[in-house]
Image (cartoon, rainbow, N blue to C red):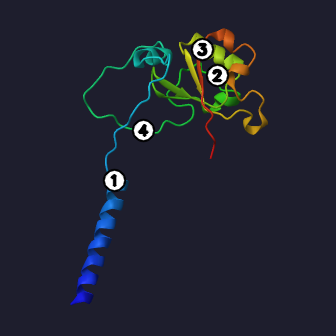
Amino acid sequence: MKKLKHIVLAGVGVIVLILVILYALFAPRSIVHAPVANAPTASQTEQIFTVDTPQPATTSAPLNTTFIGPRENIPKDAPSQYGFWSFAVPVTGQLSRSGQPLISEFQWLKQNGWNGDVDLRMDGEYNDPTADDSKLPGFNALGFHYLHLNILDG
């Protein structure tokens, strides 16, 4: 009888352990945002990183996610050299992406309504001394709102 009691207790202990692990893995968590001094508000950030083009009509239909490949959904006069060979506009009026633009391609972006640049490369990536867009001669004079986030590739 004592042996059966130990087996039952061990079984209950295993079940409780499994439930605790499952709760730890799948329990909803609330996100706590720490205040940041002089951080832009959501509307200011939206103004910084939007392109001045007409916005599509809003709809209550669910958003569909579609892969936008290189050179898709772009203006006809978009440059195509160097880093811009992969230029694409996944979200019209909101988001574009490309490889490393040349200064002439940054000038084209500015002339066509882009006003922000988020650079995701690591400093010195691929032994490129200008892996930080703000170090490109003439970049700062264009007046882009610039955010450099060192993201490790791979």
Q: Secondary structure at mark 4?
A: loop
Q: Nearer the viewer, residue 25 or 55?
A: 25
Mark 1 or mark 2, earlier in chain = 1
Residue type (three-letter) at the residue carrying disc 1:
Phe
**Labels 1, 2: front one:** 1
**Labels 3, 2: front one:** 3
Determine which residue is flagged by label 2: 79
Mark 3 or mark 4, earlier in chain = 4
Determine which residue is flagged by label 4: 66
Residue drawn where x is 69% and y is 20% of the image: 134
Q: Secondary structure at mark 3?
A: loop
**Residue contact at pointers 2 and 4, CB within 8 angstroms:** no
Q: CA distance from mark 2 to mark 4?
A: 24 Å
User: Where's residue 9, x and y in %?
Assistant: 26, 77
Determine which residue is flagged by label 1: 26
Q: Secondary structure at mark 2?
A: loop
Residue type (three-letter) at the residue carrying disc 4:
Thr
Q: Nearer the viewer, residue 10 or 114?
A: 10
Q: Which mark is residue 52?
A: none
Residue drawn where x is 62% and y is 15% of the image: 108
- Screen quadrant of the N terminus: bottom left
**Residue contact at pointers 3 and 4, CB within 8 angstroms:** no
Occupied quadrant, residue 60 = top left
Mark 3 or mark 2, earlier in chain = 2
